[in-house]
Image (cartoon, coloured by chain):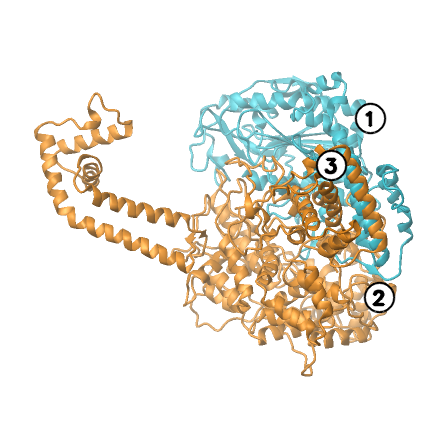
């Protein structure tokens, strides 16, 4: 029972995407329409990758697949020759094939898959295997390891539309009509810059008679500086960007310049291959500079610990594994984690591949346990100039000082001789001295040295320091100039942003295969960096590979995975689900693409265009496929409940950060600055009480920092800001290719009660009262326009007017309560407005900010 | 997941909401929009029928965070007393994982507190735990538990999720995912925190109650003793209950009107979530308010309303259990006695001892003991060797041996299971793993741990991991 339910497509999607058609505390009984897969007619021609591999992989490969250590009966079904040799498969002769006999076996002791595997084949799956053997049991290499093939598309046509519609025609579905312009502009704004349009922008677009109005809008948004912020959201998830180390004390570390580097890279449309190379080997590229080094912070984004008693070898192993998983998720679309302990059971990825890939990072200089270093100073050109000036000033002061050194030394010799000859009591050691103990200690030490017969260099330095710092009054100005220049430089340098970056050290860590992932077992073979053996290899002449080789290999034309992985994720952002549904796994246990030609075309075009991300975004969002309505006819819903064929758009709840951004934007509170240190919005007191070493107080930001976009919120891995967490922002402890989209009561509590949203509501109310002095109805129109960019319907007006009356009457009876609600948040309440009226309108604004439509991109 | 939107198709369910727009505020929202009206049955899990008899309907997991010393509490070792101050035999320790004692001289430390025989079987347990001693005949003591991790954070992760890699669902999430909830106005998985007075306890990360790759609604919800019991539960200042209700009602009504324009299953869910959220605003504060408990009851647990103590949380756990909460996890922090073992351990023991026993007796009195599984466990055990490099004597982290106890829900009463070697270094008899413990918990809940899996990263991911885990049948009645 458990098995069949868990295998039901609905629950699979639940597990992966948090598909919550049901409530938080329980299902509401909204049963998803069943995907009629198990009753679908068998395809005339069975295709191995589409029809057979998923069955074999899920049911057979665990014991009869790539993992040699767990292979049963010495039978391998993932390689055709071996399957034939063993007699499991006799092409065209299902009746002779042991495989068919065993899956149809009545005796549970002989039946495959065996009962203890908790796997069962459906009748349709058995029929598919039978027909496949009848048709000759042709194998195909796994689709994702074959080079993508680019379909020929007539010039002037949008390939996305050609390929989507071709597929729709094949399966007998028709595309949906184009959405209205308001829907289109809202969709585009949220998808491309992550903010809602203003009513004026919507009106202008609706009225734009130009045939290129839509394309022009797309172009403007691609050039908008918020474009990089929007695209950064998903990249920051996939590389697990966060402000803290993750384990145990979860202390801060300096990495925010990397976040800004991502934003700027996307805004500048840095080619994705270069974008990749800078992250993995920005310190090793021939033209390494500050920018490429900041990109290389990618290698430092993993989890680390400062826990006492943590063993370096243990964490070294964790860090190797963490990095390999990151490359697997972000670029290769491969699940690699299992190969930490054993060869992959479903994909050709071996333990050797795992640790060889990890060996690429053995040169990165870093403490294994303990606090990270401060990091590299990240400067603007002006700051670089300023630092250069301070360096020059310091050098100048030092030169001036050098000039007087000979005189100082003569004076020092004289002083030393006097002290010894006249047995001088140093001032600190006089009975009436007020000097602190360390100063007395230093003086005693100097006296001892002076009376000694010989001196070490350290002792010589101690005497010199004492003489120059304390004893002499000569050349005070010069000496102070040196100290001042030093201090000024240090203060300035300390104030500069810092970023952990990759620094390559020649003393590399040893990486060896850890048998069963056990870091205490040092019997495994020591490995050099190498690329997964089953993928095309780079042409290098036997020299040791470096991170730079890895980076180039990831984005080489021969690598069949990277472009597909990245395009699949990008597609999901604009269309709701990936073409291959499991974004982190293009391997055997993922799902074959519903439209392989489409994914391949996108991957090829991406590479052919010079890895031009904006070009690909443009291609996707200008397609007619993108512009469809997101509503479905009952027939379409029945035929394609999860919109895997893209005969319509998808409606999705906004990402956590955009929920925040939208409320701040429509109220006028948003501070649109780009980049900078992470910010701390209001957060419930005591939310960090379980953090320790050290304990921490959360101090919310004041001023503009309070109103920054969600992607700048301080990312505390072990306790992510609760209003982001409620809307499924990931903790970023692991790389996340995809976010859940849940629908839970905490979201209602956040939108209703989090001071951020209450403040946004009252500021929005004040804004409307200021901008619109007409009737309540006219004001409501303005509210609707600002929040939803449409006019309210008659019924909506009635509901809201009723609500307004209720709050007016309550606050008239209790104006102090009105005062209280207007004090939520840091923004001062306007003094020229009637408190009761403003407070009542605040509730109107609050209701609007809570609407499903307000937080849904449709 | 995409919202499913349909032109002109309005499910019958829509009718339940009635015409809310007429006469706002004339009916109580909570009664009009009771989730019960929405739900055929509260909170179903994915397991529609269970392969095994369900002995436990709910779990109360008492986490002693920091790693309590089994050698002072549950696992008496006379031989260790004899060896006190002498070197630990290298045959035991060679090549083993150590934490802060790595590279240190390893010296035996005898138990620091006497043991006393308790219960019908005269089981020896610490004199520091007189109350738990009084319920020895109701619990099953496991002296042979082990774990894989040896630092706090990974060890908690392993105990809670069965994996040392972040991002896996915690056991509470697994259980509520499988079984759903019996509470219609409370989270199915609740977390309660307390800590000892005075010292600085080890941190605990929210990932310990995360839903991992399961749907977010299965994540644990922390009920806090200070501030809002659930984050953002209180209405804003200046907003009365009546006003909050009116706003929620308006949100629901406007969403419903939108639903008429373009049907979307997500809107239906959204509406239900607003109703639940509003209900929680009343139901949760009532539930956590211990002032209505009889003084007798408070005295039995040893707590005062609102004191945030472990004892108060035990009483709250009983109330949550009564309300149908599926998985209740308590954390009591500050058991990490690298030093000051003699001084601090008795304090921690006193903070939990009476309340643990009171919880068991209270559940028994209310007829809940037989279907509530209680587990008492730290994240790892402590070394039989002394640690002296952090101040007055203590013990280091240890993963080869730890003691836990279980009770209720078909667990054998008054039994001792498993044993360690004579110095208490390693479990040697009936050795149990964390995966075994999880398998056993699932078994009592009626779930076959092997078939309870979810596809994740290409694998059938299970709470009990890849390697075969075994139900610890020896502790079952």
Q: Is residue A87 visible?
A: no
- SS of the residue at dot 3? loop
Q: Report whether A377 appears left or right of A400.
A: right
Looking at the image, the residue that sits furthest to the bottom is: A154
Is residue B292 or residue A753 the one in the foreground?
A: A753
Residue at 55% x, 66% y: name it: A533
Q: Colour of chain B?
A: cyan
Q: Colour of chain A?
A: orange
Q: B24 above or below A549?
A: above
- SS of the residue at dot 1? loop
The image shows residue A852 at horizontal and vertical percentages of: 76, 52
Q: Which mark is residue B239?
A: 3
Q: A330 above or below A822?
A: below
Spatial CA span between label 2 and label 3: 45 Å
Dot 1 or dot 3, earlier in sequence = 3
Q: What residue does disc 1 label?
A: B367
């Amino acid at each position: 029972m458990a098995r069949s339910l868990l295998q039901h497509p609905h629950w699979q999607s639940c597990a992966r995407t948090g598909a919550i058609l049901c409530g938080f505390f329980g299902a509401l009984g909204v049963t998803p329409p069943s995907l009629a897969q198990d009753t679908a007619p068998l395809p005339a021609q069975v295709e191995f990758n589409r029809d057979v591999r998923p069955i074999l992989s899920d049911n057979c490969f665990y014991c009869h697949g790539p993992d040699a250590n767990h292979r049963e009966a010495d039978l391998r079904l993932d390689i055709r020759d071996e399957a034939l040799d063993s007699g499991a498969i006799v092409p065209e002769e299902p009746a002779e094939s042991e495989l068919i006999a065993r899956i149809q076996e009545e005796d549970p002791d002989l039946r495959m898959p065996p009962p203890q595997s908790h796997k069962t084949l459906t009748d349709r799956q058995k029929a598919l295997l039978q027909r496949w053997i009848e048709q000759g049991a042709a194998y195909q290499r796994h689709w994702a390891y074959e080079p993508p093939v680019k379909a020929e598309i007539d010039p002037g046509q949008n390939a996305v539309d050609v390929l989507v519609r071709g597929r729709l025609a094949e399966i007998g579905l028709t595309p949906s009509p184009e959405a209205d312009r308001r829907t289109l502009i809202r969709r585009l704004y949220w998808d491309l810059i992550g903010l809602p349009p203003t009513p004026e922008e919507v009106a202008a677009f609706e009225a734009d008679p130009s045939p290129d109005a839509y394309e022009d809008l797309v172009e403007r948004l691609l050039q908008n500086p918020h474009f990089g912020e929007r695209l950064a959201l998903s990249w920051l998830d996939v590389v697990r960007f966060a402000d803290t180390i993750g384990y145990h004390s979860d202390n801060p570390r300096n990495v925010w310049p990397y976040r800004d580097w991502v934003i700027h890279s996307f805004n500048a449309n840095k080619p994705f291959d270069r974008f990749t190379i800078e992250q993995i080997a920005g310190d090793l590229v021939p033209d390494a500079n500050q920018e490429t080094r900041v990109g290389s912070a990618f290698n430092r984004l993993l989890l680390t610990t400062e826990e006492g008693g943590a063993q370096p070898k243990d964490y070294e192993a964790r860090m190797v594994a963490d990095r390999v998983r990151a490359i697997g998720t972000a670029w290769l679309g491969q699940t690699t984690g299992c190969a930490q302990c054993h060869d992959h059971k479903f994909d050709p990825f071996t333990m050797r591949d795992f640790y060889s890939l990890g060996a690429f990072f053995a040169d990165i200089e870093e403490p294994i346990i303990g606090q990270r270093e401060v990091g590299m100073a990240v400067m603007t050109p002006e700051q670089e100039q300023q630092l250069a000036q301070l360096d020059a000033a310091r050098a100048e002061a030092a030169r001036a000082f050098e000039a007087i050194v000979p005189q100082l030394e003569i004076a020092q010799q004289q002083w030393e001789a006097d002290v010894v000859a006249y047995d001088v009591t140093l001032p600190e050691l006089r009975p009436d001295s007020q000097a602190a103990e360390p100063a007395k200690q230093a003086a005693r030490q100097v006296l001892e040295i002076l009376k000694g017969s010989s001196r070490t260099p350290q002792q010589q330095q101690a005497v010199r320091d004492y003489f120059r710092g304390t004893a002499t009054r000569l050349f005070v100005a010069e000496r102070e100039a040196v100290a001042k220049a030093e201090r000024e430089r240090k203060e300035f340098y300390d104030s500069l942003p810092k970023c952990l970056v990759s620094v390559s050290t020649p003393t590399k860590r040893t990486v060896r295969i850890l048998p069963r992932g056990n870091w205490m077992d040092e019997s495994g073979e020591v490995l050099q960096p190498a690329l997964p053996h089953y993928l095309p290899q780079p042409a290098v002449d036997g020299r040791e590979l470096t991170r730079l080789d890895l980076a180039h290999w990831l984005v080489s034309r021969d690598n069949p995975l990277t472009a597909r992985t990245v395009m699949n994720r990008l597609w999901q952002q604009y269309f709701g689900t990936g073409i291959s549904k499991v974004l982190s796994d293009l391997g055997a246990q993922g799902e074959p693409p519903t439209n392989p030609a489409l994914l391949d075309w996108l991957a090829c075009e991406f590479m052919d265009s010079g890895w031009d991300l904006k070009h690909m975004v443009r291609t996707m969002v200008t397609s007619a496929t993108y512009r469809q309505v997101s509503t479905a006819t009952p027939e379409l819903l029945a035929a394609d409940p999860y919109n895997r064929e893209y005969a319509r758009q998808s409606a999705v709840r906004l990402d956590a950060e955009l929920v925040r951004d939208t409320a701040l934007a429509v109220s006028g509170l948003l501070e649109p600055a780009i980049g900078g240190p992470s910010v701390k919005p209001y957060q419930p007191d005591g939310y960090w009480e379980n953090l320790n070493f050290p304990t921490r107080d959360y101090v919310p930001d004041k001023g503009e920092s309070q109103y920054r976009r969600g992607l700048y919120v301080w990312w505390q891995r072990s306790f992510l800001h609760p209003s982001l967490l409620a809307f499924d922002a990931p903790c970023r402890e692991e790389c996340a290719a995809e976010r859940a989209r849940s629908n839970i009561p905490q979201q209602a509590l956040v939108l209703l009660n989090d001071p951020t949203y209450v403040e946004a509501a009252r500021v929005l109310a004040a804004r409307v009262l200021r901008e619109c002095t007409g009737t309540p109805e006219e004001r409501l129109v303005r509210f609707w326009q600002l929040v939803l960019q449409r006019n309210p319907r008659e019924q909506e007006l009635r509901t809201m007017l009723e609500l307004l009356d209720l709050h007016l009457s309550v606050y008239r009876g209790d104006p102090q309560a009105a005062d209280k609600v207007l004090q939520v948040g840091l923004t001062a309440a306007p003094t020229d407005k009637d408190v009761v009226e403003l407070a009542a309108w605040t509730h109107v604004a609050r209701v609007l900010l809570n609407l499903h439509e307000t937080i849904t991109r449709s | 997941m995409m919202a499913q939107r349909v032109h002109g198709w309005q499910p019958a369910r829509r009718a339940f909401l009635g015409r809310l727009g007429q006469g706002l505020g004339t009916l109580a929202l909570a009664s009009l929009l009771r989730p019960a009206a929405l739900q055929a049955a509260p909170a179903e899990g994915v397991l529609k029928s269970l392969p095994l008899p369900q002995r436990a309907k709910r779990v109360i997991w008492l986490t002693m965070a920091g790693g309590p010393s089994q050698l002072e509490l549950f696992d008496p070792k006379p031989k260790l007393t004899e060896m006190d101050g002498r070197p630990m035999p290298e045959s035991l320790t060679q090549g083993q994982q150590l934490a802060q004692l790595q590279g240190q001289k390893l010296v035996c430390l005898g138990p620091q507190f006497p043991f006393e025989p308790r219960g019908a079987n005269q089981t020896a347990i610490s004199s520091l735990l007189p109350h738990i001693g009084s319920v020895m005949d109701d619990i099953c003591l496991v002296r042979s538990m082990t774990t894989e991790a040896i630092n706090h954070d990974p060890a908690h992760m392993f105990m809670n999720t069965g994996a040392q890699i972040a991002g896996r669902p915690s056991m509470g999430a697994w259980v509520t995912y499988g079984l759903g909830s019996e509470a219609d106005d409370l989270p199915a998985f609740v977390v309660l925190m307390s800590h000892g007075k005075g010292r600085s306890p080890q941190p605990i990360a929210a990932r310990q109650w995360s839903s991992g790759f399961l749907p977010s609604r299965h994540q644990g919800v922390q009920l806090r003793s200070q501030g809002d019991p659930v984050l953002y539960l209180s209405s804003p200042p200046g907003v009365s209950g009546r006003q909050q209700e009116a706003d929620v009602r308006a949100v629901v009504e406007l969403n419903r009107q939108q639903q008429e324009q373009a049907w979307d299953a997500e809107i239906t869910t959204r509406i239900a979530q607003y109703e639940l959220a509003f209900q929680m605003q009343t139901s949760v504060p009532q539930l956590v308010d211990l002032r209505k408990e009889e003084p007798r009851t408070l005295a039995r647990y040893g707590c005062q309303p609102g004191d945030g103590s472990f004892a108060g949380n035990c009483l709250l756990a009983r109330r949550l259990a009564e309300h149908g909460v599926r998985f209740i996890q308590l954390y009591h922090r500050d058991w990490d006695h690298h030093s000051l073992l003699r001084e601090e351990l008795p304090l921690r023991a006193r903070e939990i001892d009476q309340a643990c026993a009171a919880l068991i007796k209270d559940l028994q009195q209310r007829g809940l003991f037989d279907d509530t599984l209680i587990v008492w466990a730290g994240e790892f055990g402590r070394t039989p060797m002394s640690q002296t490099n952090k101040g007055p004597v203590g013990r280091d982290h240890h993963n080869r041996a730890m003691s836990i106890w279980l009770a209720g829900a078909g667990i054998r009463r008054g039994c001792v299971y498993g044993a360690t070697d004579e110095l208490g270094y390693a479990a040697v008899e009936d050795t149990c793993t964390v995966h075994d413990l999880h398998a056993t918990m699932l078994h009592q809940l009626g779930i076959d741990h092997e078939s309870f899996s979810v596809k994740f990263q290409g694998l059938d991911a299970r709470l009990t991991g890849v390697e075969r885990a075994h139900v610890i049948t020896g502790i079952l009645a």
